[in-house]
Image (cartoon, helix red, strand yellow):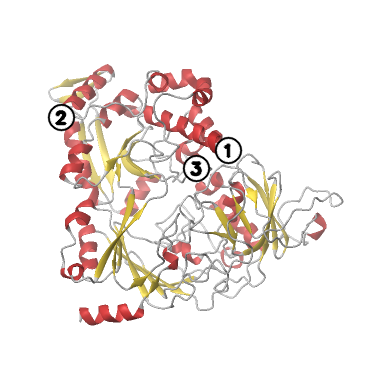
Amino acid sequence: MPRGLFFAKAFLLISGLLINVSILASEATTTIDSSQRPAGNNVVGDLNTDANNVVPVETVHGLSLYDSPELPADFPYFPHVNPQAPKGGTITHTAVGGSFDSTNPFIIRGTPATGVSQIYDTLMASNPNEPFSLYGLLAEGVRLDPDREWIEFDLRPEARFQDGEPVTAYDVVFSLNLLREEGNPFYASYYAGVNEAIALNEHQVRFTFSDTDSRELPLIIAQLPILPRHYWEPREFTSPTLAAHPGSGPYLISEVDPGRRIVYQRDEDYWGKNLPVNIGRYNIDRIVYDYYRDRDIAWEAFKAGLTDFRTDARAATWAIGYDFPAYEEGLVKRLTVPDVNPSMMQAFVFNLRKEKFQDPRVREALSLTFDFPWLNTNIFYDTYRRTESFFQNSEMEATGLPSEEELALLEPFREELIASHGSDRLFTEPLPIDQPLNLRERLRKALALLRDAGYRVEEGVLVNQATGQPLSLEVLLYDSGLERVVQPMLRNMARLGVQTSLRIVDINQYLNRQRNYDYDIVISHFPQSNNPGNEQRDFWTSAAAEAPQSRNRMALAHPAVDALVEAIISADGRKELDTATRALDRVLRWGFYVIPHYHSGETRIAIWDKFGYPEPFPKYAMDLDAWWVDTEREAELQRQRR
């Protein structure tokens, strides 16, 4: 049960648009100067301000990317919640296809348990009914410099970690530095625009920014997870652990059975349970994640009532699988929740570190072997649509020929783009890319591309004439459920003479091979929000190409891509943002760096009918944190099961 949008877009899917600070029902103006810094080594950095020339900035209750947050400072609770929702009960989720050996989700080593994010509070919390607004959580007030050179937060004096220790500004400073210096390298990139964090006193903290062009950065830092300094400072942060370490959030780690189950218990003494952002939320007493290595076993466990919440990603199951007695008797129900963000790009990703994938003609040829029409008809019950864009189903999706505004961004890199893409099609041919629907025609075109790239078929094997080496590749998986998607593609590749193999390994070996770049092709996901920003650096840029555990699985390193990502981050308005994302989308698609999969445009959920939830669902997130267990229905379910 994720904390709002936390951990979604690392950990907030918000954009590079103009940030305006709400002045609604603001508190008294507060100013801080360098004389208020406490002495000793608890303070990091320097304010770099003149104490006699302090510009007052209004203290407000919320931040927004747009005009102002919708809710006033005295809002009692989020509008979508049930403030009278009962407390109690258990929700048991199904975790499929993996295992875990760590309760630390912030480091490279180990495989973290599902749901660990819910033990942490952040400085501010998102409202699922607003696209990009934040309200105070650990922080009760916030001040943002009009020039975005700094932001300050006033922490709530009553905020506590789960072991009773107070949450202070020194914990905030410690958290930023720890994550950037010892955490997953993603954090160093994600918070790269933050110059330093400064504890002004025990309950006030300031962040100074070196990147004042990133319009989303103040909101990103507002959702920094706050870790307890007193706990982690004497411990080895970079090593996996199974300890039930303390956070400050509404749930505690209760039970840890490595690789099998993790249980979170609602903290009865949670310091923030009566805050407006929390009332009506975090109602369920126990949140359980049961791990299953096999999808079919997990499905049987759900039908038997061993788990009671399931996100159903298998089209066949959704189409014809719900014919068991509990569903027919109304004990199990299905929900579909429309996606509000761009449809996620799921794709086979080529490892460009391998010489055989350097030629774009080879990548394009291999992409033609993915026979989506056949898969959709024979396996998916015609429930999916082919994904084409990295920003599918949004205004940011590139279509047709480049606009004049796009060309202004692309022209400085024309020569590099033509060289890397093997042609000028990016500038001269419209999107979407026109590919034959008939498999025979696609394979004929693929073979022609491979011949142009210097390959010939010799005794049924596709061989590089320059090196004499056959073209061979391996697809690496950890989820056997995707084998039915991979095997038809590999058979089509074999018809071209490509030597193929499929390797299914356990999750730990899979992660280790990813970290060591030891793969030819893997399946990866590129989720997007309606306002992309800093996280794009981790997806596509040269800096992320060799960073361990970055999302740049293909090791893409191109000056045009780097420049377009920075254009997205520094966009001054919606029009500029859309132009930059369309240009980036165009470059990525004509590069054939991935073989796109498919999308449904909705999330499919099956539940045992014991839950209450807000209806209608919030506009921008389903907010499982606002669900509750209906004790009467739960008792009836138990009676009927008996």
Tell me where residue 552 sits by quadrant. Answer: top left
Q: Is the residue under label 1 in contact with that under label 3 (CB below 8 Å)?
A: no
User: Could you say which disc has been placed on residue 573 in the image?
Assistant: 1
Q: Is residue 182 visible?
A: yes
Crowdedness near tag 2: few (<14), some (14–19) or many (≥20) residues, C-alpha within 10 Å: some
Left or right: residue 533 versus residue 91 is: right
Amino acid beneath label 1 = Gly
Of callouts 2 and 3, the N-terminal one: 2
> In the rendered view, would you say 100 is above or below 393?
below
Residue 148: give x, y in percent of width and height: 68, 45
Q: Are marks 2 and 1 in contact (CB under 8 Å)?
A: no
Q: Residue at x 13, y 25 (%)?
A: 460
| Residue 514 location (% of width, % of height) | 37, 45
Residue bearing the label numbered 3: 532
Amino acid type, label 3: Pro
Residue 495 numbered mark, or none: 2
Which one is earlier in the sequence, the residue at label 2 or at label 1?
2
Number of numbered discs overlaid on the protein picture: 3
Q: Nearer the viewer, residue 609 or 379?
A: 609
- Residue 465 visible here: no
Tell me if mark 3 has few (under 14), some (14-19) or many (20+) residues whose alpha carbon lies within 10 angstroms of its own.
many
Q: Is residue 397 left or right of residue 367?
A: right
Q: Quadrant of the C terminus?
A: bottom left
The nearer-to-camera label among 3 and 1 is 1
Amino acid found under the numbered disc labelled 2: Arg
Q: Secondary structure at mark 1?
A: loop
Q: Nearer the viewer, mark 2 or mark 3?
A: 3
Give the vertical position of 438 relative to 344 (above or below): above
Which residue is most to the right?
52
Q: Earlier in the sequence, mark 3 or mark 1?
A: 3
